[in-house]
Image: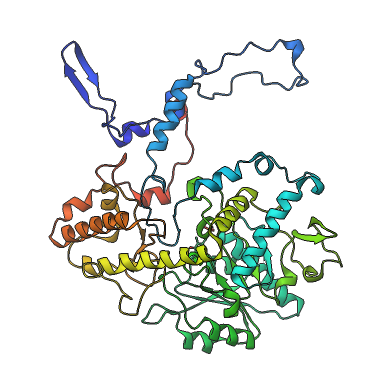
């Protein structure tokens, strides 16, 4: 059964010259598209090749003997299939993408151009290092930038995403404790941390203890300090935190954690809000991942792989993973294994991945950094914060902002569902109705510390005109909800390729593989 006929049943049509016709399901520019398996057939092909004569086979008898059931399509049909699918997507190149915590900002095309230069795009990780000096220099230069921007003495470039960076940082922390013979079992994680933090700590074998937030949306410093002790290996703190707020006590917390023999892991995925303004090394941080795919605008989500380099303090640098680039006698080379000559990496915990990291993302991130310069990067942070505060203050008379009274926010504006009380409309309904207005929904029900959270991160790359459109749409929805127009929300979205889906079934019993019709139950 096709998705097409499940989602929008085709309509029988009686008309002149046709006894019964069937609508396609297309609606103006909203085009239906079946799975490629449903529209293709094994008899059709987009290529026209001579059969290979048996004697010419170089596969030593291993060549395929029969068809493997891949669908065939004429070239034009194949192009249409993927173009139609692409139009059912929403991306930063289409419109404002307010997903909080994700930093969906414009990806400058200059970065793409540079990343496609053959000297970067065509290098292979197993090439002799003499032939990739330029690539190594680029990794080295980016590493120096990341160290300077954070005031941290070492960086591991290999981690492939933020969560992978957290794992890298926590493995270094565990290695540092083990090297001292100091077995510690607990990692403290504030309630306002990103969900990946407790997951990472648990994955590394630690018991996670949650520290509550205070009434101002920050970690309860007194509760955190009171819990420190000889069993605490580390504190994992997100700054700015997931309420979009700066943690002003971080230096005090770091000093106390160090005095108690622990380490401070800072989730730096929200670096976009403070780059050029705050250096985490000055706040006593021992390890922090930086999401190049957020702060430094390398495409992410459907657009490309992540990259999550981790900066380290003096104390953790010796435990950083391999490989790393060093300069020796005017040449750059990748240190691939432990050696006495590598001064500050004597006790590396090992590797995060087979090679050196996401080269394409390094190229894009360095292009972004160099085209902004240090001053430009500071302005990125300032404008991101300005835009978020503009959204917060333009909406907080109609929507409820739980921490609106505790000063400006950082890069994200946080609302709760207080303004929807007794309207019969939920946070989910507002998010779905926003789709009808042509926007991607904001982050919903996260952070968990506020009820029915709506987290909006406009980023610095939206103009005031675009922000005003978005604000006006949200105001319109808030007014409609308060005016008792709940029906409009309950079945939204009405103008998307699919209407309200069963989210519980999608999460609990997803159908991830296509089954041929003849064997389907
Ligand atoms: C995005 C994000 C992460 C996870 O990063 P991934 O690259 O998605 O693994 C962790 N913490 C915070 C605060 C984030 O915003």
Query: Quadrant of the rendered structure where residue 199 is?
Result: bottom right
In this figure, which colouring scheme has been used for the structure? rainbow
- Left of 43 or right of it: where is 204? right
Q: Nearer the viewer, residue 499 or 257?
A: 257
Seen in the picture, residue 276 relative to 123 is either above or below; the reply is below
Q: Residue at x 21, y 53 (%)?
A: 489
Q: Which residue is drawn at 78% across and 61% down?
A: 326
The furthest residue to the left = 483
Q: Residue 467 location in percent, x, y?
A: 31, 57
Q: Count up the numbered dots.
A: 0
Q: Residue at x 18, y 59 (%)?
A: 481
Q: Residue 65 location in percent, x, y?
A: 66, 18
Q: Which of 126 and 432 is in front in this view?
A: 126
Seen in the picture, residue 48 relative to 253 is either above or below; the reply is above
Query: Quadrant of the rendered structure where residue 430 is?
Result: bottom left
Q: Residue 325 location in percent, x, y?
A: 75, 59
Q: Image quadrant for the C terminus?
A: top left
């Amino acid at each position: 059964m096709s998705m097409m006929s499940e989602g929008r049943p085709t309509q029988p049509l009686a008309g002149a010259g046709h006894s019964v016709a069937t609508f396609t399901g297309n609606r103006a520019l909203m085009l239906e598209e079946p799975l490629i398996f449903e529209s293709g057939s094994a008899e059709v092909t987009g290529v026209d090749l001579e059969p290979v004569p048996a004697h010419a086979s170089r596969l030593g008898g291993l060549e395929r003997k029969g068809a493997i059931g891949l669908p065939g399509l004429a070239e034009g049909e194949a192009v249409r299939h993927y173009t139609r699918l692409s139009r059912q997507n929403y991306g930063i190149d289409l419109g404002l993408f307010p997903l909080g915590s994700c930093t969906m900002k414009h990806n400058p095309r200059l970065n793409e151009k540079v990343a496609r230069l053959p000297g970067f795009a065509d290098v292979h990780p197993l090439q002799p290092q003499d032939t990739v000096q330029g690539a190594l220099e680029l990794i080295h230069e980016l590493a120096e930038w990341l160290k300077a921007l954070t005031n941290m003495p070492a960086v591991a470039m290999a981690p492939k995403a933020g969560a992978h960076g957290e794992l890298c940082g926590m493995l270094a922390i565990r290695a540092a404790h083990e090297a001292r013979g100091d077995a510690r079992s607990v990692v403290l994680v504030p309630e306002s941390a990103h969900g990946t933090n407790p997951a990472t700590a648990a994955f590394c074998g630690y018991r996670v203890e949650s520290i509550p937030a205070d009434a101002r949306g920050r970690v309860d410093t007194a509760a955190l300090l009171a819990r420190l002790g000889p069993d605490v290996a580390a504190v994992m703190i997100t700054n700015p935190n997931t309420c979009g707020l700066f943690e002003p006590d971080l230096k005090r917390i770091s000093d106390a954690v160090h005095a108690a023999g622990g380490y401070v892991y800072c989730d730096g995925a929200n670096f976009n809000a403070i780059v050029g303004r705050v250096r985490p090394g000055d706040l006593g941080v021992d390890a922090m991942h930086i999401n190049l795919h957020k702060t430094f605008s390398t495409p992410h989500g459907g657009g490309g792989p992540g990259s999550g380099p981790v900066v380290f303090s003096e104390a953790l640098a010796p435990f950083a993973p391999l490989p790393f680039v060093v300069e020796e006698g005017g040449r750059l080379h990748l240190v691939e294994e432990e050696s006495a000559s590598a001064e500050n990496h004597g006790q590396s915990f090992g590797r995060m991945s087979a090679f050196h990291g996401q080269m394409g993302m390094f190229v894009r991130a360095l292009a972004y950094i160099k085209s902004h310069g240090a001053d430009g990067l500071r302005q990125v942070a300032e404008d991101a914060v300005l835009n978020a505060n503009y959204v917060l203050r333009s909406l907080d008379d109609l929507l409820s902002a739980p921490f609106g009274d505790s000063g400006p926010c950082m890069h994200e504006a946080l609302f709760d569902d207080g303004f929807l009380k007794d309207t019969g409309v939920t946070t989910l309904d507002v998010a779905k109705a926003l789709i009808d207005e042509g926007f991607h929904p904001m982050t919903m029900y996260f952070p968990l510390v506020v009820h029915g959270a709506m987290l909006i991160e406009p980023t610095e790359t939206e103009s005031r005109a675009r922000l005003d459109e978005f604000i006006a749409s949200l105001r319109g929805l808030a007014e409609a909800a308060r005016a008792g127009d709940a029906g409009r929300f309950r079945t939204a979205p009405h103008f998307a390729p699919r209407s309200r889906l069963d989210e519980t079934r999608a999460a609990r019993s997803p159908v991830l593989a296509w089954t041929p019709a003849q064997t389907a139950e």
